[in-house]
Image (tube, coloured by chain):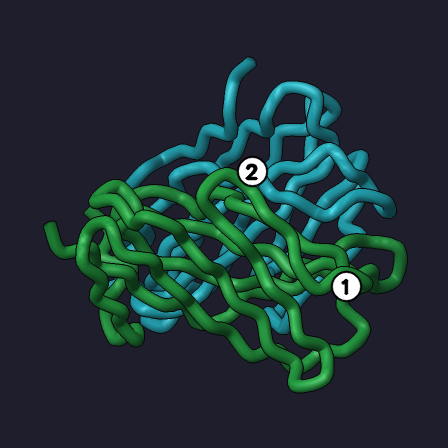
Chain colours: A green, B cyan
Amino acid sequence: GENVGLHLPTLSVQEGDNSIINCAYSNSASDYFIWYKQESGKGPQFIIDIRSNMDKRQGQRVTVLLNKTVKHLSLQIAATQPGDSAVYFCAENRSSGGYQKVTFGTGTKLQVIP
Amino acid sequence: ETGVTQSPTHLIKTRGQQVTLRCSSQSGHNTVSWYQQALGQGPQFIFQYYREEENGRGNFPPRFSGLQFPNYSSELNVNALELDDSALYLCASSPGGRTGDTGELFFGEGSRLTVL
């Protein structure tokens, strides 16, 4: 299958521990910030998003934190499971010329150690 | 509800050839975006189609072109293929149209293009 993890920074986490994946962004005009998960051989899958006027949002086992002062976004995964192993991308969504433009970062590979 | 489907899944072309990739959007979605993902990189935005018109484009040359059909399915065409065009081409659909929502994208599994 597609090895999208090649050359990407890697985070190795023990099963059951919490994972924190970080992302720096550059565009202060973004409306939403989004986290996607991409498993080998598959397209990216939406995990969670956060509006630019928020600083925290929680989902099922995941939390996204947004720090606009330092332009930093993080994804926290609680009780990491083997099925969480994948490449994680942060993305910015910005309205541009009447359409939604989603720009992806370079990604972080999460390896869960059983 | 049918998800986003892409074809072909894999193909091999030689430099200078032309390729057409196809995408069927998720039911109820009227917007299709195309992305290029090189190995080890994040997806790069190529362009977006809304109601059969291109309404946004990334930093890709004119030899990358597309179409959207009345049923919202879409094609990506690449002319005069170059070695650097080797990548995974992802199609994503969304219901949002020009404005509004978070821009959540629903991706297909991609078409892997190899240019020799």
Amino acid identity at mark 1: Ser
**In the image, B54: left or right of B104?**
right
Mark count = 2
Location of residue B2 in the rendering, given as x and y in whole percent from the top left corner: 52, 17
Which one is nearer the viewer's eye here, B98 or B16? B98
Residue at mark 2: B106
Residue A52's tag is 1
> For numbered disc 2, what is the local secondary structure?
strand
Q: Which chain's residue wears label 2?
A: B
| Residue A88 visible in the current orientation | yes
Q: Is residue B8 above or below residue B61?
A: above
x then y, percent, for residue B67: 66, 41
Which structural element holds mark 1? loop
Residue B21 visible (yes or no): no
Task: Identify residue type, mark 2.
Answer: Phe
Q: Percent position (x, y) of residue A96? A: 83, 63
- Judge by depth and name the residue closer to the eye, B87 or A62: A62
